[in-house]
Image: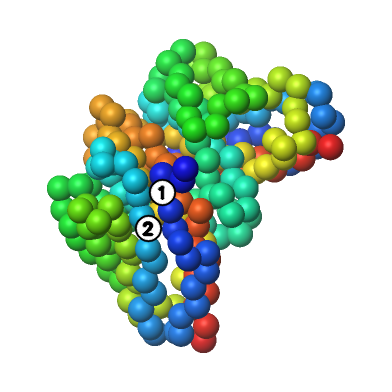
Amino acid sequence: DMKVTQMPRYLIKRMGENVLLECGQDMSHETMYWYRQDPGLGLQLIYISYDVDSNSEGDIPKGYRVSRKKREHFSLILDSAKTNQTSVYFCASSPGTGGGAETLYFGSGTRLTVL
Amino acid sequence: GQQVKQSSPSLTVQEGGISILNCDYENDMFDYFAWYKKYPDNSPTLLISVRSNVDKREDGRLTVFLNKSGKHFSLHITASQPEDTAVYLCAAGENQGGSAKLIFGEGTKLTVSS
């Protein structure tokens, strides 16, 4: 079953706490992404990963870092979370090769609230 | 600035009518264009995509038109139905060896009224 799994689904943290968002995919996709979605702004790209330990900044990387040690797993880390990082975070993956290489498969999202 | 822009935050169409959703982009290097559909509290899913070597692609009730000189692409949905009610996100990017760093627009909320 082709799937992108995000954990947790909902998360509440206090300002200054560290946050770890996890994402997994079972499709052996090369490329993985982290986006955040805010009202009126659509999906904004935070980081893209082309494969294990091959990560690249997106449009809004400040305040975030990522880790990809296995192809199927991509983590987003917020060191000392800020209230303006309250958002819905989507992980996605794409095949990177073949027909439909660019097609993004999204996880169900993590709704993060930073108090 | 916003590289991919959807100027209409919302659109209402009568059932059976044609829904036209528009998207503008800035980067000449973009060569891949897509439309995603998103229901509330759900994740976006790909509807249809097109590469820059064509200016039109049809798939059932959906047609994507690409105007490269105008840096504009649109999605037409014919015979619109209430179940088409959703947020539609356009996306564009440059294919980089298979992957594309997709930039999304802000979204247009389509409501199909019966």
Label 1 crowd bin: few (<14), some (14–19), many (20+), radius 10 Å? many
Find residue B65 and report its horizontal and vertical position in percent.
Answer: 25, 62
Q: Earlier in the sequence, mark 2 or mark 1?
A: 1
For label 2, the SS is: strand
Residue A8 quadrant: top right
Q: How many marks?
A: 2
* Left or right: residue A20 compared with residue B112: right
Q: Give the answer, above or below, for where A25 lies relative to A55.
A: below
Residue at 61% x, 36% y: name it: A6
Q: Amino acid at mark 2?
A: Cys
Q: Are marks 2 and 1 in contact (CB under 8 Å)?
A: yes
Image quadrant for the C terminus of chain A? top right
Find residue B2 and report its horizontal and vertical position in percent.
Answer: 46, 45
Q: Which residue is mark 1?
A: B4
Residue A27 quadrant: top left
For label 1, the SS is: strand
Q: Give the answer, above or below, for where A77 lies relative to A43.
A: above
Q: To which chain does the residue with label 2 belong? A: B
Find residue A57 and report its horizontal and vertical position in percent.
Answer: 48, 24
Residue at 31% x, 49% y: name it: B33
Residue B69's disc is none
Find residue B86 and report its horizontal and vertical position in percent.
Answer: 52, 65
Query: Is the residue at mark 2 from the same chain as the one at mark 1?
Result: yes
Q: Amino acid at mark 1?
A: Val
Q: Which residue is mark 2?
A: B23
Whether residue B69 is visible, yes or no, is yes
